[in-house]
Image (cartoon, coloured by chain):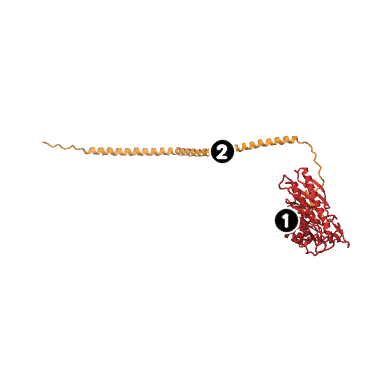
Chain colours: A orange, B red
Amino acid sequence: MTERQPARIPAHVFVMLSASTAVYALVLAGVAGVQSRDDAALAAARDPVARAIEQVAAGHDELGDRLDRARAGYAAAAQAYGAAGGAFTTLHGHLDALAAAVAKVDGVSRSLPTTIRLPSVRSSVSGGGAPTTHATTRASGG
Amino acid sequence: MHVREGRALGSPLRLLVAAGQHARAVDEAWLDVLRAFEDVDAAMSRYRPDSELTRLNRRRGRPTGVSRLLMAALAMAERARRITSGRFDPRVVVDLERLGFTAAPQAWTKRPPADEPVLRRAPDGRVELSGPVDLGGLGKGLALRRACRAGAVRLPGSGFLIDAGGDIVTLGRPDPANAASRWSIALEDPSGGTEPLATCELPDGWAVATSSTRIARRLDDAGTMVHHLIDPRTGRPGGGGLVAVSVAFPDPAWAEVWTKELFLEGPSGIGARARGRGLAAWWVAADGSLSMTPAARQLSTWVRSEVELSPPAASVLPRPPSPNLAMG
């Protein structure tokens, strides 16, 4: 019997495979290079937009801060207004009392006579005179 | 305020009773006051020939029975003589009569030694005088003492003042509604001014007496002006340089004694003597200046010399010390 020999691959097949692989690699490299250039161009084209977006974001943040400060100021102003409101209430009460007093004085002043008669007084007085006493101790001759 | 007025012992007599008493009670008290002075006048007057004292003097030292009232007065006079070392001595009658201050003649001119007692009491209770006695000022003080006691009985709880010609005794308050009220007394200006030299307020039950040369002055035989405040040590008017002395004291009779003693100390010695006795005393020198003891200043409520020397009201300068007011 005859022993069967394994099949042999021809050499040109290997050459062909190698050649096609090389071609494929070259093509792939070329495509990759082209694609890389396109990506770089695209990135360069998109860069101003990104900066604009960052500027918009920063402006938004600043606006938010301003709003917070404005809110706090408003709250403080509202609190001060509330306090001032109490003082105004007290002042108002005082003004009412003053108005009542003025009205009374006005009424009394209207009731006063236009002329009065003063009592007669001594035309001369001695300053620091002796106080009134019950008796005087004096020479009795005893 | 109830007021009753009359005369006794040769001087005006006045009773002031605080409001609130019934007029009838005041009248009864006034009668008691008059009776007290009449009793003293009958017993001790040198101006009445029928007084017990005049009759006793005219006995010229012979043993004589006397009333309890006169005995008490003589005993006090002798005590005052001893305490004042003879500056108060009731036996100046001889000198008074010699200077012309006559009354009912006492008919006895003996001048005993100053250290001899005024009287001796015999075993039978009778009295022997060592010389003629005058109880003028002391008698008035004793009359005030008796009158005050009578008033206190007749007007219990009521304030009153009795003024016997300038010698004054008080009791209680002048204002029943004011527990702090006190009887207020003016000190006469011995120069004759209408305004007093000072005023004071007396504690309850106190008296005030004054010895002054403003009255009872006369020219003696030599033409010299003399007064009636005789220094027993010299037989002449004493207190040279002083014209008035007032003393406030709890008893009117002793107030009389102190005024005599202080007056005879003269201006140089009166301050030390008055302070030594702790007296409330005011005195006026011949130049019109008023001095007083610290005790008297505490009672004083107004002093004319201080008012006159005080700065104008608008001034803010501190008040200067009064050179015219020497604290004795």
The label on residue A131 is none
Q: Nearer the viewer, residue A32 or B276?
A: B276
Left or right side of B177 for A138: right
The local secondary structure at tag 1 comes to: helix
Q: Nearer the viewer, residue B266 or B2?
A: B2
Height in image: B241 above or below A11? below
B117 or B290, nearer to the observer: B117
State which mark lies toward you, 1 or 2.
1
Q: Residue at x 24, y 39 (%)?
A: A15
For the residue carrying disc 2, how many other residues have a C-alpha within 10 Å: few (<14), some (14-19), or many (20+)? few
Q: Considering depth in this image, is B63 or B280 the residue closer to the camera? A: B63
- For the residues beneath circles 1 and 2, the answer to whether they share a chain is no
Tell me if B176 is positioned left or right of A38 in this view.
Answer: right
Under tag 2, what secondary structure?
helix
Expressed as whole percent of the image width and height from the top left, the position of residue B253 reads 77, 55
Is residue B114 left or right of A39 when viewed as pictured? right
At x 64%, y 36%, the residue is: A93
Q: Is residue A98 visible?
A: yes
Neighbor class of circle 1 (other Cα within 10 Å; few <14, some 14-19, many 20+) is some
x and y, in percent, of residue A14 in the image: 24, 39
Chain of the residue under label 1: B
Q: Residue B7: x percent and y percent?
A: 83, 50
Q: Residue furthest front?
A: B124
Check the residue under mark 2 and report the chain it is in: A
Query: Do the numbered discs 1 and 2 sit on residues whose CB atoms are within 8 Å?
Result: no
Residue type, mark 2 in image: Gln
Disc number placed over residue B295 in the picture, else none: 1
The residue tagged 2 is A79
The kind of residue on which mark 1 rests is Ala
Name above or below for residue B259 compared with residue A32.
Answer: below
Question: Residue B191: where, in percent of width, then height?
Answer: 83, 55
